[in-house]
Image (cartoon, rainbow, N blue to C red):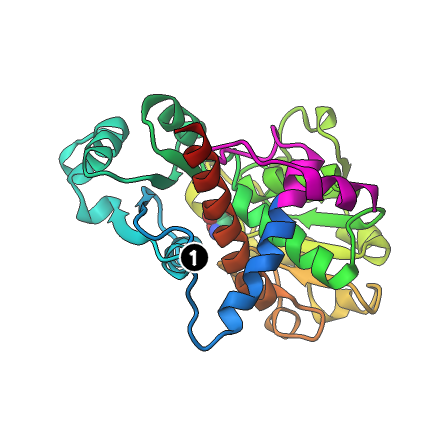
Amino acid sequence: MALKRKSKQFKWRRKHLLGLRELSAEEITYILDTAKGFEQISTRSVKKAPPLRGRVVVNLFFEDSTRTRNSFALAANRLSADVIEFTKKASSVSKGETLLDTAKNMEAMGIDIVVVRHGAGGAPRFLSRSINACVVNAGDGFCEHPTQALLDAYTIRKIKGTLEGLKIAIVGDITHSRVARSDMWAMTKLGAEVIFVGPPTLMPSQVERLPVSVSYSLDEVIEKVDVINMLRIQFERLGGNPFPSVREYSHYFGLTVERMKKAKPDILVMHPGPINRGLEVESEVADGSNSVILEQVKNGLAVRMAVLFLVNQAAAQKD
Ligand code: ASP
């Protein structure tokens, strides 16, 4: 309650959204509150508002994406911005052009906001120091995926009313997951208790220094938690064999119909997508009544509208 009152007087000052580690609970709450205001635009027959009219947003994606890229594009369109789509495969990056040269060339065309996804951790921060445009991190290496965590927090808050006091399990390939890291920051800052669950081989080194508890047994955790976020195994980032077989992984860490029988009846089942059906989640669970996976995608639009709106507003105030 106190947080809500404070959030009303709060002034957003960041022209970049690089990660949630550096954000306060107040800033996170402010983004979620702003997103709430944008949610109803998507329910109108004319799904547009003017705040970014005349602004140019570039989607600079060096890694594949379905949800995040389209969600940012749609969010920018709904705020009346012009949107440029950049993908690594269809650009001069395939001819050897660097990230900085690409961004500087984009900037020369008069862009205002760069939404960047890159395989290297820290790429968005590097860009923010090198160009004048606003930079929004759409996923950098294993580091952060702030808008995913914001939409996760938004979804939980919308259904449960608050994150304060909730127990949230984040399950699976924690080591390679930028979603796990951003979720951890958002959720703990908003008062939830986060438990990382997975095999020891998929736990980050020095996990004990993070504000989470750790469990190697999903069966021990499932009955205690209010929310369970199932991560995708990041096959593209795995080196070596972190578990003997996919079947064995599924047996111990998959969210199955059987395992769900032990969960609280109102548990929220989340997944950032893309889902490996039958590996981390059984289809019946992914499509079942506790699943909020498509609600997450829906809320992502309002959250990304809020982020684009806020960074643009902060930049305009600094000009
Ligand atoms: N879409 C999320 C990400 O880009 C999760 C995933 O790929 O597993 O990190």
How far across and how far down the image is residue 235, in percent? 46, 47
- Spot the residue most to the bottom: 45
Q: For the residue labelled by badge 1, is the local secondary structure a helix, a strand or a loop?
A: helix
Identified at 43% across, 61% down, the residue is 49
Apparent side of residue 76 relative to residue 9 in the rendered image (left or right): left
| Residue 3 inside the magenta-drawn segment | yes
The 10 Å Cα crowd at callout 1, few under 14, some 14 to 19, many 20 or more, is many
Bounds of the magenta segment: 1-30
Apparent side of residue 217 relative to residue 117 in the rendered image (left or right): right
Identified at 47% across, 40% down, the residue is 313
Nearer-the-camera pick, 114 or 242: 114
Q: Is residue 32 above or below residue 259?
A: above
Instruction: Please identify the quarter of the rendering in which residue 206 is found.
Output: top right
Q: Is residue 190 above or below residue 24?
A: below
Instruction: Please identify the quarter of the rendering in which residue 127 is found.
Output: top left
Nearer-the-camera pick, 161 or 251: 161
Apparent side of residue 215 relative to residue 291 in the rendered image (left or right): right
Which residue in the protein does label 1 denote? 75
Q: Is residue 184 above or below residue 219?
A: above
| Residue 41 inside the magenta-drawn segment | no
Nearer-the-camera pick, 118 or 251: 118
Instruction: Please identify the quarter of the rendering in which residue 21 is found.
Output: top right
User: What kind of residue is marked 1?
Assistant: Ala
